[in-house]
Image (spheres, coloured by chain):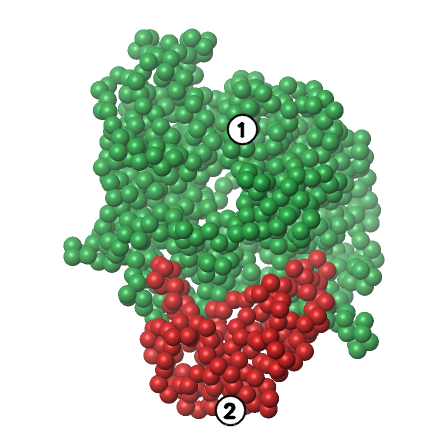
Chain colours: A green, B red
Amino acid sequence: MLDNLKPHPIETWLKKNNWSFYDHQLKTLELSKSNFDILLVAPTGGGKTLAGFLPSLDDLIKNERLDNKLHTLYISPLKALTVDVHRNLTKPIEDQNLNIRVETRTGDTSNYKKSRQKLLPPHMLMTTPESFALLMADTKANDYFKSIRYLIIDEIHSLVNSKRGDLLSLNLSRLNTIAPECNRIGLSATIKNKEAVLNFLSNKKKTKLINVAENSQPSIQILSSLNRMPWSGHMATYAISDIYQQIKKSCVTIIFVNTRAQAELIFNKLWHENENFYKIAIHHGSLEKEIRRKVENLMSIGELDCVVATSSLDLGIDWGRVDLVIQIGSPKGIARFLQRIGRSNHRFNEPSKALLVPANRFEYLECVSAINAIENNIIDGDIDKIGSTDVLAQHILAVACSNPFDVDNLYKEIISSWPYRELKKTKFLKVLEFVKNGGYSLKHYEKYSKIGLNKNNLYAIQNSSVRNKYRMNSGTIVESYMLKVKLGNKTLGQIEEWFIEGLTEGDTFLFGGRVLKFLGINNNNINVKVTKDKHPQIPSYAGGRLPISSELSVQVRKLLTKKSYWENFPEQVKDWLNLQSKFSVMPSTNQLLLETFPRKINNKKRFFLVCYSFEGRNANQTLGFLLSKRMQRMGYKPLGFVATDYALAMWSMNCIEEMDILFNEDLMLDDLLEWLEETPLLKKNFREAAIISGLIEKKLPGQVKTGKQIIFNSDLIFNVLKKHEPNHILLEAAREDAYRGLIDLDRLSNFFKRTKNKIVYQKLEQISPLAIPLVLEINRESINKSDLNEFYLEELENEMLTEVGLN
Amino acid sequence: MHLEKGSSYAETGQLIPPFDSEATLNKLIYSMKINKINKIILLGDTFHDEGALERMDLKSQGLLRYILDNYNVIFILGNHENKMKLEKITFYHDYVIDNIHFTHEAKLNNQHQVSGHFHPVASVKVGSKKITEKCLIHSENHLILPSFGTFTGGLNINSNIMKPYLSNYYDIFMLGKKRVYKFTNLNLVH
């Protein structure tokens, strides 16, 4: 193979830089040339991107190429990655004078460039799934894409099993119809279910999985600090000076955090320590893109000493030399952690170096478990997500925008897409009806149908405003209502509206590493000025935290069972676990531990029930809602609950007994279905489904008002549909999302199965050591529970009446 | 009540379920029945716009007719209905009983008034929780009612728009799921 390539420009370029081809790159080239669709699974730094492009470059160099016809399409999930790969690809192309036109197309591309790309397609187009969907919805899409020979999808593992992946998959099926000769290459990080990803990528018979193993085990340690590790909280501020010492010792460090709020706080605290004036930057999704680009550029030219980042930096951008990756807080998942670790020592054959900083004592256990899992090659499984209904609705409209379609042909095309392979025709027709006129059985919007049958018996859009509206609202990313943060004329980023609602003028908060003072709101913007306040608030974002993965949670449970495992833990953690054994018992792997104890909240005696379910925050929270309902009926007067990844604590006015009845599985499942219909979580999913499916708009053309005023309130629609048309397709869509998402139905069912008839009940006189972190969360966490609103209203009213002497 | 508010969005391409009129009217009939009402004053914006009646489905029209036939209904004219002219329905600007003025929008005078228009909503804080619900306002001799329609939202009491109509101390009655809760403006949060 190498002989054939001797005069190959790419090899010449590689040699110039003292590099040479990896085996898997050559293998990819060889197989792709023989028309195999390939999934290349390799750790970071493994030369995946070049592997992905080799077949395409080879074809363009060797064979006759048509100018102004699209030859290769590259899709990556992140705009920044797309830009980065473009930059990297340009190097060998220019160096060897290859005359290949490469262009990027994302939400950030100027309208001028976009028009030019449409009229005069480049040879290679680098884009995102969203921009790709928009191109496919164009009336000239068929012509544009029929010349395509290679399709490369980067970081494909991060796209599957999400709504973004659903939409991409539907468009890939369309691409199959338009350009069946196209060869596909998927590039993925190390994951468990590789076959599923290969199926997502391709329907061809000729497919191949190329798996490149990690050459060396990463070197991971847990920070041991002399400072006291807190019981609860997620901020890890106790370890700031230790972290700073680490930054001192390495050349370039990336600090990964799990939330934007953590990023702001850690960044702020680090700067207070920064006596050596190291160049430390911050990077997260709510910051304005210019600010993010600047950080990315400085990183790539080696100008920064440290970056504090959220998952916004998770994917494969080449940062050059990174010596150390610090993960603050438990990584919550093994695969995710591995990918983050992979950022350090971006050279394929050298071990990556990582440091875990647990934010509280329980997280210490999670960190140890993560390390154990990695050493034993255990990795989290992936759920096999079924294609979302709202995304399907958006896609059907997009197809109509492009060209009139035949119903049966479209159905066949859709079921050839992996996430939608089991879609029933009846459901497809129901979604079609929705797209047409809202899908209401009780009344019809004939006059305002979006699509309708034309004289050739094909579905077409009724007028061009439908197309315009579609373009403004396409995509699967729905954010909460955001306001722009403006410092004078400069936009710093965005912040969620509900956080601002909690502020009054003069309040200060952290953003983009600065302390800002809230001056006021006008239109869509909040005005701020820079200030020096010692105690600014930290914006929290509804996007929030991922729950601990099942696999990691199993590891933690195992860890707790054997005392011998704890021997080497730091005193703080060891003592805590020993105390738990003494005053109560340790939760075991196949039983459910329940503890009850009395405790005062705000000077009132309350009764606590703690359930160590270990199923992750979302499932535990759902369990909390269910138990509240049950307890309400049994007369215990539940007042609230708090859930973490490992346990659930409920408190009530009356003492809780009859555990068996409370946790009876059969009764629970009845409650579950009923509760699901009333949960505020369902409304949240409904809103998302309503926007993605196109029922209500994200933005109307020309509108700049805040989210609430112009857009129809989805909660109102939800209530009406629930009452009058409970089987409406959007409600079904919301339920599907809810089961999988915040409710985490699978894990909850798993919990019931696992613990059936295996309750271990400890009746205690006071709080147990293991429950301390949980109870401490009560003041920090505030989960909106409109179910329990009545209780709170009643409490407040009672308080007032008592004050006044009327109670 | 803003009947047919749902269907009014169809022109913008948002095909909102057109069930609000039926739901609202059913709710109204039910309320009147269980409270044994025989006369009702609708404080304006009964219809979301001039085209509402035409868009209304037959069943809802039937419900409306039922109400008109079986109850004594007084229609106050609201800003959304400005251009409406209906047979058999007289719109009042101001309807007086026992010196109490029933109008659409509150007036800045000393008269005893019952009005609507603002769709008031209030927020109170209980511990760290903020709860926001529709509410009725009793400010000296003024009563401002919450909106009744299925698709009606609300304007927070704190807004500058409502301030001129409220005295320094007033009562608010928040609509919970099962009952009404009484607070004063001192309990309000932003």
- Residue sticking out furthest to the left: A456
The picture quadrant where one finds residue A200 is top left
Image position, residue B90 (x, y; %): 42, 86
Image position, residue A528 (x, y; %): 62, 44
- Residue sticking out furthest to the front: B109
**Chain on which label 1 sits:** A
Q: Is A530 located above or below residue A21 in the figure?
A: below
Query: Residue beneath label 1, please?
Result: A294
Q: Could you tell me how many numbered marks the image carries? A: 2
* Element at label 1: helix
> What amino acid type is highlighted by mark number 2?
Asn
Residue visible at 28% across and 66% down in the picture: A446
Asked whether residue A284 appears in the rendered view, the answer is yes
Residue visible at 69% across and 48% down in the picture: A507
Q: Say whether residue A421 is left or right of residue A525.
A: left
Q: Is A85 located above or below residue A791 in the figure?
A: above
Asked whether residue A362 appears in the rendered view, the answer is no
The picture quadrant where one finds residue B134 is bottom right
Query: Residue beneath label 2, please?
Result: B38
Quarter holding the C terminus of chain A is bottom right
Quarter holding the N terminus of chain A is top left
* Element at label 2: loop
Q: Say whether residue A285 is left or right of residue A795.
A: left
Image position, residue A127 (x, y; %): 38, 33
Q: How far apart are marks 1 and 2 (CA)?
A: 70 Å
Q: Is A546 located above or below residue A12 in the figure?
A: below
**Chain on which label 2 sits:** B
Residue visible at 83% across and 46% down in the picture: A582
Residue visible at 28% across and 20% down in the picture: A60
Local crowd size for mark 2, using a 10 Å CA cut-off: few (<14), some (14–19), many (≥20): few
